[in-house]
Image (cartoon, helix red, strand yellow):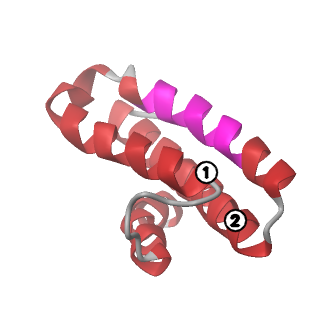
């Protein structure tokens, strides 16, 4: 598996965890939310360590802020959760396509 495919795979998986995070928050299930947050941050860290993503550090920083904000009981950011989920869709399509 090449490096680019690895990043796409990781981003698609991060998208799955972020979706779980959003769903847990909307249900008020803070145990599930915390579990999804932990998994999302593990994947996020793995993505951040990829050599070919040095120029995308700002984007990754924003992703981390979004994950952290969704994880809060009361969000600071005015996020549209459908837009957040849609952000990850191209990565999933690349992996399955």
Which labelled disc corresponds to residue 2?
none
Specify whether residue 23 is painted magenta. Answer: no
Up the image or down, 56 lies above or below 45; here it is below
Picture coordinates of residue 78, whole percent (x, y) = 38, 70
Q: Which residue is disc 2 drawn over?
A: 25
Query: Could you tell me which residue is drawn at 53 percent across and 64 percent down?
Result: 96
Query: What residue range appears in magenta?
Result: 36-47
Picture coordinates of residue 7, whole percent (x, y) = 40, 39
Mark toward the start of the polypeptide (1 vs 2): 2
Mark 1 in CB contact with mark 2 (< 8 angstroms) = yes
Q: Which residue is disc 1 drawn over?
A: 71
The 10 Å Cα crowd at callout 2, few under 14, some 14 to 19, many 20 or more, is many
Specify whether residue 46 is painted magenta. Answer: yes
Up the image or down, 41 lies above or below 23; here it is above
The 10 Å Cα crowd at callout 1, few under 14, some 14 to 19, many 20 or more, is many
Give the side of residue 38 with respect to residue 52, left or right. Answer: right
Query: Could you tell me which residue is drawn at 49 percent across and 35 percent down?
Result: 44
């Amino acid at each position: 598996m090449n490096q680019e495919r690895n990043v796409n795979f990781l981003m698609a998986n991060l998208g799955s965890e972020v979706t779980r995070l959003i769903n847990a928050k909307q249900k008020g299930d803070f145990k599930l939310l915390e579990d999804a947050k932990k998994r999302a941050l593990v994947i996020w860290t793995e993505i951040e360590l990829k050599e070919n993503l040095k120029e995308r550090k700002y984007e990754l920083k924003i992703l981390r802020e979004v994950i952290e904000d969704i994880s809060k009981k009361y969000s600071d950011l005015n996020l549209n959760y459908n837009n957040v989920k849609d952000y990850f869709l191209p990565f999933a399509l690349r992996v399955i396509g």
